[in-house]
Image (tube, rainbow, N blue to C red):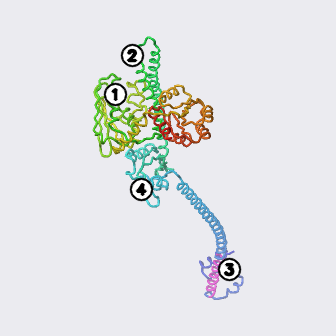
Amino acid sequence: MFQHYLILAEDLLDKPVVTPEATAALSGVLPFFKSLEELPSDVLQLLLTIVSAFIILVTLTFIFLRKRRKMNIELKLKTQEAEHANRNLEKLNKELLEQKERIARELANSEMLYSIMLDSADDGIIFYNTDWSVKFANPAIYSIVGFDHKKERLFDIINDRELLHPDNSDFHTERSKAINQKGFFETEIKVRHKNGKYVVLSTKMVEVKDESGSALGVLSISRDITSLKDTQNELRIAKEKAEESNRLKSTFLANISHEIRTPLNSIVGFANLLNDSNASADMREEYVEYLNQNTEKLLQVITDIIDLSKLENNEIDICYNPVRINSILSYVEEYTSKLIERSGKDISFTIEKVFPDDRDIVYSDDLWLKRVFRHLLDNAVKFTRAGEIELKSALVGSSIMFTIRDTGIGISKKNLKLIFEQFRQEEDGHHRSFEGLGVGLTMASKVVENMDGYLWVESEKGKGSEFFFTIPYRPVDLNAFREAEKQSDELLTNKDWSGKAILVADDNIDTLRYLNRVLAGTGINIIHARSKPEITDILQDKDTIDLVLLNMQMTELGGLEVFTVIREIDPAVPLVARNASVGKKEKDDILKAGCTACLVKPVSNEQLLSVISGFLDSD
């Protein structure tokens, strides 16, 4: 309809205003215009123009309103769509924000977890940048080297070349090369601890890359294996010692078998020869001499083993008494001369005595001192095929220094310490050129040490040896010493113990015969007991027993219980125990159990008479 009016209005405007066609057209639309045909043409023209304009305006208005309505509808639809889209966008945005917050929380928790794990780890963890600068290091790596992770500068510790042991000077070069070529590196390094000591680290490194394969850095994990290395080293040393001990045991068994069987074979042989009725008196005397020599040799081997055990357990007692250095040197001179004579070697022996008789008396243990000389001179004679041996003494400060020089085979420098180890010679095993247990120098060194002295050696292979040892110089008043000597001589002569009774408890018939012989001239009444029941019976039956001499090695004696039994019968009788080997603790136990005195076998005649005199002459 509006299009119709619009076309009409356009048609009226394009044509002359007052025409029959225009009037007819207008009359067709507006029938009342038929009555206006009589109007003047200019009025009619104006009216037609107004009507046309009005029609156009109305038409355009309707068109506009229609389009606006359509646009409003479309706008409303668009607005609704936009609002819906906006609501969806807000919802999506909210979901994204929630997801972001959740991821952030999870990331924070993950970082906290990793941080706790890294901080709690015992292993040192480091992350290096690609230029080997430190990006991160956990507290453990600081603790391992003794630094404070809150105070110390990170890179100063981790990359400080001065902290590395000289053996690991190529560490930085090696790690870079390995990472570049293989992507990982594994090694053990020594790093200096803050206290100055070195710790051993087992270090593993691996290159870290992103998804594209680009390097991000290097992750390093280090573990302190110092204790492990120390343990491994201790186990290695223990294993070596065990192997060495086993080897020495085998050597010792081979040596002791030889050292015991050799004199024992001679003893058996010459003892059998003594039974030969055709042997002359001179021959028998010679056989007895050989028997005595080999008996002394066998006894010396056994004594050395027992004494070594005492020395190892620190169970020897150094008894300081007034002794004459010159007398000891005279004994040493006689001993060494006989030793050289028996060896059949062409060796000259000289001894230098520098102490005058009024200054050679000192407080020392003459028995142990003589043993030191015997061990050193035994070696000098043994390892000198021909030549000379010289013994010198000198006062050096507050010590007496003895020097024993020989022209023997000498000792290589690498073995100067080895020879002081027990059962050791430069040549060990079945290929030894020289006999002996290999304990002489060990014992001499330990005895001198127990006497507050020091023993050392200077030697060169093929040029002989010089052994030096010192003992403290503790001078004794000459007059007091002479009075003690006089009393000692009187103690051991003209003994008359008539009316005295001694109970000898021993199941060894040879020992009983020996004691009978030694005490035969004293007039003492010797009563024998061969078992614990016999001991108790005799003590209960006899009114007076002045002394009990007890062999601790008696069969079925019952140990220390026997002292309790004896003391219950006679609490006052002097009780002297004889034992083959008595350490300090064992001796203390024996004395605490009720024993009055203790003698260690072998016991000399003088020792035996001296102890017995101490009890019988005091009545």
Label 3–label 2 contact, CB within 8 A: no
Highlighted range, magenta: 43-63
Q: Residues within 10 Å of mark 2 (few under 14, many from 20)?
A: few
The Cα atoms of the two marked residues, 3 and 1, are separated by 172 Å
In front: label 1 or label 2: 2
Q: Earlier in the sequence, mark 2 or mark 4?
A: 4
Q: Quadrant of the N terminus?
A: bottom right
The Cα atoms of the two marked residues, 4 and 1, are separated by 67 Å
In the displayed structure image, the side of residue 394 where residue 563 appears, left or right: right
* Label 1 sits on residue: 381
Image coordinates of residue 282 in percent, x first then y, are 39, 16
Give whichever of 424, 611 is nearer the camera.
611
In front: label 2 or label 4: 2
Kind of residue indicated by mark 2 = Asp
Q: Residues within 10 Å of mark 4 (few under 14, many from 20)?
A: some
Q: Please, what secondary structure does the residue beneath circle 3 have?
A: helix
As displayed, is residue 281 above or below residue 385? above
In front: label 3 or label 1: 1
Q: Please, what secondary structure does the residue beneath circle 1 have?
A: helix
Q: Identify the disc placed on residue 282.
A: 2
Q: Please, what secondary structure does the residue beneath circle 2 have?
A: helix
Give the residue displayed 60% in from the left and 80% down from the top: 16
As displayed, is residue 571 above or below residue 210? above
Q: Report the residue that reaches farthest toward the right.
A: 31
Q: Earlier in the sequence, mark 1 or mark 2?
A: 2
* Label 3 sits on residue: 24
In the displayed structure image, the side of residue 299 where residue 23 appears, left or right: right
